[in-house]
Image (spheres, rainbow, N blue to C red):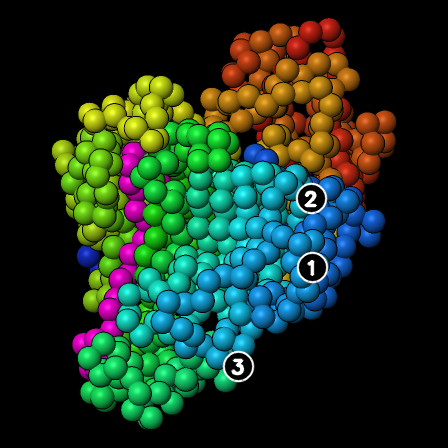
Amino acid sequence: MVKKNCSALTIACLVAAALLTGTSGVAQAAVINAIPNASKTEKSYNNSFLSVPGYASLGVKDRSSYAGTSYHRKVANGREFLQAILDAGSGAVKVIEVTDTLNLGWTELALTSAEKTKYSFISKYPDPANGFTNPLLSTSGVSKLNISNVDGLTIFSTSGKTVKHAELKLQASVNDMVIRNLNFDEMWQWDDSGEHKEVGWSFIKVNGANNVWIDHCKFSIAADGLIDMENGSSNVTYSWNEFGLAAAQNPSSSSSIYQSIEYMESKYAAGTLNTSTSLYYKMRKEGASKNQIMAYAAYHSKGHLVGSGDKDFTNYVGSNGVEVKDGNQRLRLTMAYNRYTNVGSRLPMIRQGVGHLFNNYFDNSTHQSATDTVAAISKYGGDKLARGMNARNGASIAADTNVYNKINEPQLGAERQGDDTGNMNAPFDVLFKDAVNHSLIVNSTVTNSSGTSYTGSSWDNNGVNLFTSGVKWDNKASIGQWAWSSAIVGVENMSKSSPPSTPFTFTYGTNERLPYAYTTFPLSSVVSVVNQNAGAAKITLSAADWLRTQVYDAFGTTEAESYTGMSGVQNEISTEGGQNVGYIENGDYLVFNNVNLGAGASGFQARVASANAGGSIEIRLDSPSGTLVGTVPVTGTGGWQTWTTKTATLSGATGTHNLYLKFTGASGYLFNLNWFKFVQ
């Protein structure tokens, strides 16, 4: 494993010495090999990748101890699910396990008047402006389910059960929400205008909620966003999810695509489509078969909108008099280990917030084939976008070790927001015009629609490469400079209802570090590992294991701050990247649950620093006074951030245990701990 750290001022991290070669065999420009002000480890895939990654790791909690208790509710139908959500609001339920398909459509639920009052958090979604074209949805109806006043809840399935016909909306009073191993489906229909504006159905909207982890789920296609973030949601991670559908001329007869296109075909055969406005009529009239249109329809135009509007630049008081303490500057999203199939844009699109992407696979190949090989579809089909991430209004988005296949614009937008104001309403086109958007891709491969490939960074060749075909550069001041945040000067004194008339002035967090360390597997294995593991029902775990937020690889590097529990210590920023555990005193300890030492560990390594005399790390099993298998002596290193690696020999370290690192020594602070690992 290699631990990589980078400062914005470190030239060695900006330019690698070696040249990479693309698939064409032509030597490419030297690459930037690290995201500035971030810390990462690269290693082969193992079970430790089941831990919560990214921003959500800063706020979601382990709930494995609730498995099998009264706080663990199993639900097999819509009513049971609604009752469990209601009880979660009072704290009586902490875990909801879905054991059968949940049909949550408004019509199929058929709630009584008393139930509508009891479950007032679910409501009927307005019907499409031009009526239903998907018979499945016209029969089931569509619901909007608002989840509020919940602090600490995991919704999961051990077998990848399906949730249908409802949009889950996580409101601002939701904190510490985990959704794992679920399949979300049937929120789409054919829009015969081709504009995708007829309905606003999404699968999930994170509407102000904080500390949200959505993991190992499958999302087909929806009428609007797949998962959107709004109203200042922060510390959100999407990991190991499968988004979108492959283009297929013979989809399942039970699918929304088959049902909706068969409905349109019946209208076409009956001659009841508007010949001047119907997209379906035009495609069929000029030779496209219904099955070819089914393949074309397997496309999602909008992935992840992050920041619902330019207007959310500041805290404001809503019309109901309630102060909403959210703004786009709070948005924080991690996208890791996901597979995107035929999703054309907003991967993600972020206003003013921060995005961090790593080990994702974006594949538009089957949609491109479905579009390019049929003349009528190529002529009339407007779904041709093949885009990636879009930083707006001072946002920062950094991507590491991703694969983009048949993607024409992995990055788009403008370095200076004033050069890309086409979709901004007044006065925000003026207010945000001086915002600098920071956008960077490193260690990644892109292949565009013509088959040309490039491996490297979007800063290569002074920002002229396949990663930046959709970028409008200003003076390229952002190349070589990085900021993990932006802030509008004086925003605390501004009013949303009466914004200023002069352009905003910004400050940028150029000295900030990414507040967590992250782990990638090598670029060469991204496609195979993500295809094998991303999505619902791809891996088998017990209920308790689905409720865990941390899984440890005993023989890989474990960051000290990723503990399950602790006594007496505090986290702090580390000069080696990410955080370390500090303020350690005699008797303090860290706990790491369910560490599998296998047949045995013979040694232990710890990365430590101390400005004092130091102390010792006792390695104990199952309790602070449990079996002592080894002790690491720590001496002074000359400073609290002057790091060195200390080792110990172990005896009796076998099997799976809760690991306790107990700290001993004299009075006062002893030392800091950055990471540790066992040695076989």
Q: Which mark is residue 89?
A: 2
Quarter of the rendering containing residue 677 = top right
Q: Which residues are magenta?
A: 374-401
| Pointer 1 residue | 115
**Mark closer to the observer (1, 2):** 1
Residue 25 on the magenta segment: no
Determine contact: label 3, label 2, CB under 8 Å: no
| Left or right position of 353 against 560 | left
Q: How many neighbours does mark 2 have within 10 angstroms: few (below 14), some (14-19), or many (20 or more)?
A: some
Q: Nearer the viewer, residue 117 or 354?
A: 117
Which residue is most to the left? 475
The residue where tag 3 is placed is: 254
Of helix, strand and loop, which one carries label 3? Answer: loop
Residue 527 visible in the snapshot? no
* Number of marks present in the image shown: 3
Residue at 53% over, 27% down: 579
The tag on residue 85 is none
User: Closer to us: mark 3 or mark 2?
Assistant: 2
The tag earlier along the polypeptide, 1 or 2, is 2
What amino acid is found at the position of numbered circle 3 in the picture?
Answer: Ser
